[in-house]
Amino acid sequence: MPEDQNASDLDLVRRIKRGDDQAFREMVDGYNARVYSLSYGVLRNSEDAEEATQDAFLTLYRKIGTFDESKKFFSWFYRVALNAAYSRARRRRPAVTVSLDDYVPRFRDDGHAASPEFAAFVEGAEDEAIAKDLAERAEGFIAELPDAYRDAIWMVDVEEMKPADVAETLDISIAALKSRLHRARLFVRQRLLEVAAVPKAGDAERRVAR
Amino acid sequence: MKHDEITCKRLILESLVEYEDGSMPDPDRHELERHLAHCPPCIVFLKSYRATGRTLKMLKPREIPKNLAEAVMSFVRARCDKKE
């Protein structure tokens, strides 16, 4: 997020604090798409994401007085948005968690990666129709991740936000973000391989992966 | 780093994020690339890692609900009734 963006955000924040409704409107226009998209990553449902977006802006309106202007506005507001989405998610569904350790790559004794089923996935991902199908499945796999990992992969790989901005939003170090991101990618990759693999060749691999 | 110091495990589990995002120091990068040139399993792993990345980029919602901004404004106005 560029510095001048933060400066114009701060200008809007101050105007909103003074009760300027037009400034609030500008904030909504500037941020509603991103907030919706972040919410969608948590909720995977457009109606819920829209409601979470409304919740986030209501919180913004009510709590703007608590925002510390020495911090970046976007990181504060994205946290507000994620909290709104998770709050809605908790009401909607039980938490499902997976063990990421079950999905790290497997290695042979000589230290080389053991991966007979790669070809189908790599080739499939280059075919547009198959890639679309894989993307839908990937969305489900991301939903299986623990929240901290889902946030990391959704913001960096799907939203294509800068890692520094994501780390700031999540209030973690860049190193911690990269670690979460990598583990989340390995998980999604392994799950995609399972569905993309030719069944007869992949049976044994999949049993191990589960 | 010699070839046998860069086991595939180290490349895949510890170094791939830095390699892919460009933050890896040049000497390490060159070593890794030398390793990759002689390690087909790591090449296919890297391809599948990148294919995962390409797949994830397709997930971003392209359609934002029409009138979302209006809906947000109405929602907030209804609950705040102007200034509190």
Image: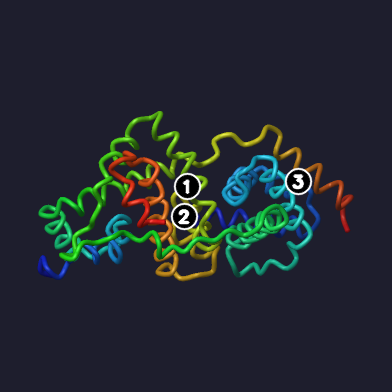
Residue A175 image-quadrant placement: bottom left
B27 with respect to A40 (left or right): left
Compare marks 2 and 3 and give the one earlier in the sequence: 3
A107 with respect to A69 (left or right): left
| Mark-to-mark CA distance, 1 and 3 | 31 Å
| Rendering coords of residue B80 (x, y %) | 86, 53
Residue A22 shows which numbered tag?
3
Secondary structure found at label 3: helix
B78 with respect to A162 (left or right): right
Residue A29 image-quadrant placement: top right
**Chain at numbered mark 1:** A
Q: Specify the amino acid type for callout 2.
A: Ile
Secondary structure found at label 2: helix
Dots 2, 1 in contact, CB < 8 A: yes
Same-chain check, marks 2 and 1: yes
Give the foreground label among 2 and 3.
2
Residue A11 visible to an observer of this rendering: no
- For label 1, count other residues whose C-alpha is less than 10 Å away and answer few (under 14), some (14-19) or many (20+): many
Secondary structure found at label 1: helix
Same-chain check, marks 2 and 3: yes
Dots 1, 3 in contact, CB < 8 A: no
- In the foreground, B14 or A25: B14
| Mark-to-mark CA distance, 2 and 1 | 7 Å
Residue B32 visible to an observer of this rendering: yes
Residue at 68% over, 49% down: A27
Residue identifier under label 2: A153
Q: Specify the amino acid type for callout 3.
A: Gln
In the rendered view, would you say A66 is above or below A134?
below
- Count the labels in the image: 3
Compare marks 2 and 1 and give the one earlier in the sequence: 2
**Chain at numbered mark 3:** A
Residue identifier under label 1: A158
